[in-house]
């Protein structure tokens, strides 16, 4: 199995084989596109072409059978008819020359009698004459005065001496209508001989040929070996005119070929007649013969072209779509990679931050207490000399400790983001929990917290600790923003326009946020407080909420207060 | 001046010693314990109005100690030291009945304030 696959791989285009390691960036996709199209075309168009070719040749051979067979039958039967006609006339003459003596035939009266009975039987006989071995016409019976004419030097006379029989080409001769001659020789003693010569009207030939029903556009006629018409033709000239056709090679059997002339292609069928210098020729015009074939050819071509076009378009389009999808998937994968990498980086940063904070916080507490004790000792003993100076130093230490405390506190909060556990949370409960954490401060600073909680809110699935942190951050900020005796209103509700979303609004009447700060409020390490905070709180909160498909919106006006709206989906989209 | 007793519980000895000395300088009666077990033992020996309790301690954790204190000495007020900035433990502690919480490192004045309130609430309760 793997061997076959290896072989197949070797046949594959290089680009495809090496994908996805081959190339970088856009050229990789264009390569992929090219290869896809190539493969689709190879697998779809090549078989299609093969099918078309096979079809073409199969149909062609069937068509040939259908056209050629009847033509060749027609030629063969016509040839036989003509041959029979000739041999009948020849036999009649042969019979005459055998049964009658030279004396009988050379006797003009006797010859007249014989000719009369011959003509009664075969009306196409025009005349009959006897020629002796010197070429002299000894007797003649017919419509012309040919007695005494000498044929000694004529070709046909030479031929009949040699072969014993002669069938002439058609000629007009003395009588100005087409006819041909059959001459038969009979030997006498001592090398002497005589010849019986008869002229035959070709009209009978014409009749024989024209009785063969031909469709218009076809032509059937006789020619001699010089290409001279022996019978009239429909389209190729009259008797004794020369046809514009090549003389076909000798064949007694019917042969069908193609010829070309200025009218285009036709089928040419022919056969040589036995015993005479005649060639039977059949011509079929292309319009008639090939019409079906040409129709089929063009239909086949049309189907082929349309199919190939459709295949090309479909393969190009699907390939473009596919490659686009692949590109999208690649991009998505890349961005996921980046995100995962980012998350991993954040997680390790978080762990580092937590470690640092844990390790630093305890010694920090000790420094705090030791410095505090130092301060106390100085303060409680009045006689210490450099009291004021020392107290300044100690206060500086304590301020620095406080700064460190803030930082470790925020760092730990930042680290906590990484430990996610999804629970079912009732948002009202959560808000009240967080408020419980702050109610002492509210009490001391006389801050009025008004709760406006909708009772029909469905529980949401989220990490409790993270959400606590989010609300603690925002509510804490509100506490920081308001003066003592200020007002904070917290309301919860289901979003009416967008189902499945819970909104929590924390509104204060504190100092408000400057528009310049508002833009950066969710940036990490951006702090609006002077001594308070590291600026991580809102950035972390926003990160937590945004990760789940939620949002934090802020509206604020200097001197009038700020409104934070936390938008949370019921189901964290990340989980 | 001081009409309440404080038990300071933290696993860092230096922290405990410095802080107790500072509180004593302010006239507060302070005992200390370095772990949860010791703290519970002290509570059996003596009565305290206020316990300052570190949440993160080896052995018996701060929240467990809080739970036990609240079941055996419901009148004793516990102020948590959430030394690790952990909201979750803080909120859990409040739910378990802690009086308040302080984030380490603590401000001594804030601590005194809260202790005073806690002691007052003992008297009230």
Image: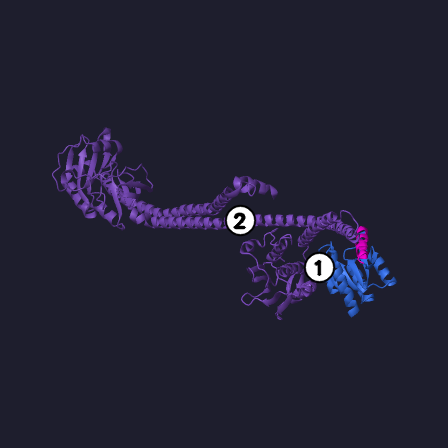
Same chain check for tags 2 and 1: no
Residue B71: x and y, percent? 81, 66
Callout 2: chain:
A
Determine which residue is flagged by label 2.
A326
Q: Nearer the viewer, residue A348 or A508?
A: A508
- Asked whether residue A478 is drawn in magenta, I would say no
Residue A565: x and y, percent? 58, 62
Chain B, chosen colour in render: blue
Q: What coloring was used for the rendering?
A: by chain
Residue A142: x and y, percent? 14, 42
Q: Which chain is purple?
A: A
- Asked whether residue B14 is drawn in magenta, I would say yes
Report the magenta stretch's main SS.
helix
Callout 1: chain:
B
Q: Nearer the viewer, residue A169 or A195?
A: A169
Please identify the quadrant where the C terminus of chain A is shown: bottom right
Residue A148: x and y, percent? 13, 34
Q: Residues within 10 Å of mark 2 (few under 14, many from 20)?
A: some
Q: Which residues are magenta?
A: B13-26
2 or 1: mark nearer the eye: 1
What is the secondary structure assignment of the residue under circle 2?
A: helix
What is the secondary structure assignment of the residue under circle 1?
A: helix
Determine which residue is flagged by label 1.
B88
Residue A282 occupies which quadrant of the picture? top left
Residue A558 occupies which quadrant of the picture? bottom right
């Amino acid at each position: 199995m793997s061997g076959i696959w290896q072989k197949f791989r070797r046949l594959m285009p290089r680009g495809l084989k090496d994908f996805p390691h081959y190339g970088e960036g856009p050229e990789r996709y264009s390569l992929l596109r090219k290869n896809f199209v190539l493969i689709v075309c190879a697998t779809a168009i090549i078989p299609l072409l093969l099918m078309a070719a096979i079809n073409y040749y199969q149909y062609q051979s069937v068509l040939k059978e259908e056209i050629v067979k009847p033509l060749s039958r027609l030629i063969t039967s016509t040839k036989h008819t003509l041959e029979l006609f000739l041999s009948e006339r020849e036999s009649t003459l042969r019979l005459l020359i055998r049964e009658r003596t030279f004396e009988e035939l050379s006797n003009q009266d006797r010859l007249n009698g014989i000719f009369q009975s011959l003509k009664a039987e075969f009306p196409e006989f025009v005349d009959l004459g006897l020629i002796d071995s010197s070429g002299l016409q000894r007797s003649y019976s017919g419509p012309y005065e040919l007695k005494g004419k000498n044929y000694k030097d004529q070709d046909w006379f030479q031929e009949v001496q040699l072969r014993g029989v002669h069938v002439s080409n058609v000629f007009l001769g003395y009588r100005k209508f087409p006819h041909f001659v059959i001459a038969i020789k009979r030997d006498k003693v001592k090398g002497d001989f005589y010849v019986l010569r008869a002229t035959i009207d070709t009209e009978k030939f014409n009749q024989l040929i024209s009785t063969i029903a031909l469709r218009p556009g076809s032509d059937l006629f006789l020619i001699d070996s010089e290409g001279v018409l022996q019978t009239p033709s429909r389209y190729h000239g009259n008797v004794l005119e020369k046809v514009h056709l090549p003389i076909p090679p000798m064949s007694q059997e019917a042969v069908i070929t193609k010829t070309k002339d200025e009218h285009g292609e036709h089928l040419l069928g022919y056969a040589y007649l036995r015993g005479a210098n005649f060639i039977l020729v059949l011509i079929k015009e292309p319009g008639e013969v090939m019409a079906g074939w040409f129709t089929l050819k063009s239909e086949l071509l049309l189907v082929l072209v349309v199919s190939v076009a459709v295949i090309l378009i479909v393969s190009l389009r699907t390939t473009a779509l596919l490659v686009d999808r692949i590109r999208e998937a690649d991009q998505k994968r890349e961005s996921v990679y980046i995100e995962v990498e980012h998350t991993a980086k954040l997680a390790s940063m978080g762990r580092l931050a937590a470690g640092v904070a844990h390790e630093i916080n305890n010694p920090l507490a000790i420094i705090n207490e030791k410095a505090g004790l130092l301060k106390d000792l100085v303060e409680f003993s009045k006689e210490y000399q450099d009291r004021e100076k020392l107290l300044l130093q100690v206060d500086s230490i304590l301020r620095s400790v406080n700064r460190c405390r803030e930082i470790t506190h925020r760092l730990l909060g930042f680290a906590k983001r990484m430990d996610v556990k999804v629970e079912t949370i009732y948002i009202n409960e959560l808000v009240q929990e967080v408020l419980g954490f702050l109610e002492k401060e509210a009490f001391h600073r006389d801050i009025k917290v008004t709760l406006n909680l909708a009772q029909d809110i469905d529980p949401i699935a989220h990490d409790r600790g993270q959400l606590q942190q989010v609300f603690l951050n925002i509510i804490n900020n509100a506490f920081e923003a308001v003066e003592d005796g200020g007002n904070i209103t917290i309301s919860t509700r289901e979003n009416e326009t967008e189902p499945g979303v819970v909104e929590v609004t924390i509104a204060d009447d504190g100092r408000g946020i400057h528009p310049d700060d508002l833009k950066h409020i969710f940036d990490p390490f951006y702090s609006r407080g002077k001594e308070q905070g590291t600026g991580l709180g809102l950035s972390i909160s926003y990160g937590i909420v945004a990760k789940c498909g939620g949002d934090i919106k802020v509206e604020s006006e200097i001197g009038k207060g700020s409104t934070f709206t936390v938008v949370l989906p019921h189901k964290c989209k990340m989980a | 001046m001081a009409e309440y007793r404080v038990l300071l519980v933290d696993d860092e000895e230096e922290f405990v010693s410095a802080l107790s000395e500072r509180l004593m300088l302010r006239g507060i009666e302070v005992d200390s314990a370095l772990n949860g077990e010791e703290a519970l033992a002290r509570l059996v020996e003596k009565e305290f109005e206020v316990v300052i309790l570190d949440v993160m301690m080896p052995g018996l954790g701060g929240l467990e100690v809080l739970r036990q204190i609240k079941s055996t000495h419901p009148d004793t007020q516990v102020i948590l030291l959430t030394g690790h900035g952990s909201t979750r433990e803080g909120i859990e502690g409040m739910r378990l009945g802690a009086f308040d919480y302080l984030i380490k490192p603590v401000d001594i004045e804030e601590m005194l304030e809260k202790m005073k309130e806690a002691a007052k609430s003992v008297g009230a309760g």
